[in-house]
Image: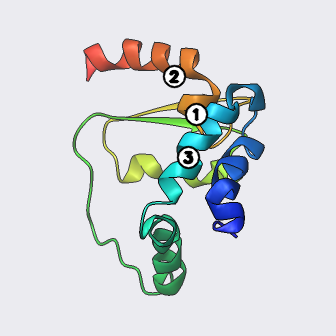
């Protein structure tokens, strides 16, 4: 599917799953499609998900905790990963700041650049 139309499907997929498609003009979509045309890129794009599906029943995270200040910015309209996946993160990340953005997709930095930049500006001096 990602190889359809010589990779043009990649840019189209990203744009079609955003909440603000007008921010994904032809030039922006082409950046993503062009990147997918690099040798091995499309395979690499899905290998994370393949590995997760293959090992989900045997995956043992052990007691690995993140001990550094961590900011998670999450679009509430993410079609790839459900918002419920954020629940319980604080168990593994001791200093977690979670910013949920309503009306924003999986592509938070492209879908809501002004909001994300403000969140980063506010959070970084405190990290």
Q: Mark 1 falls on what kind of element?
A: helix
Between 36 and 44, the one nearer to me in the picture? 36
Above or below, comparing residue 74 to residue 111 in the picture: below
Residue 106, x across and y down, in percent: 62, 43
Give the label, 2 or 3, closer to the camera: 3
Query: Residue pushed farthest left?
Result: 67
Q: Which residue is mark 3?
A: 32
Q: Which residue is mark 1?
A: 108
Q: Are marks 2 and 3 in contact (CB under 8 Å)?
A: no
Give how far apart the Cα atoms at labels 2 and 3 are. 20 Å
Q: Mark 2 falls on what kind of element?
A: helix
Badge 1: how crowded within 10 Å, few (<14), some, or many (20+)? many
Identify the disc placed on residue 65: none
Residue 13, x across and y down, in percent: 71, 52
Q: Which residue is mark 2?
A: 116
Residue 49, x across and y down, in percent: 53, 71
């Amino acid at each position: 599917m990602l190889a359809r139309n010589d990779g043009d499907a990649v840019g189209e997929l990203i744009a079609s799953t955003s909440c603000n498609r007008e921010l994904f003009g032809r030039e922006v979509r082409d950046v993503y499609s062009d990147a997918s045309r690099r040798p091995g890129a499309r395979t690499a794009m899905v290998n994370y998900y393949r590995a997760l599906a293959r090992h989900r029943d045997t995956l043992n995270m052990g007691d690995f905790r993140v001990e550094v200040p961590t900011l998670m910015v999450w679009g509430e309209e993410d079609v790839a990963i459900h918002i419920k996946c954020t629940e319980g993160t604080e168990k593994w990340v001791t200093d977690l700041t979670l910013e949920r953005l309503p009306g924003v997709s999986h592509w938070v930095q492209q879908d809501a650049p002004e909001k994300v930049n403000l969140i980063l500006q506010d959070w970084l001096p405190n990290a």
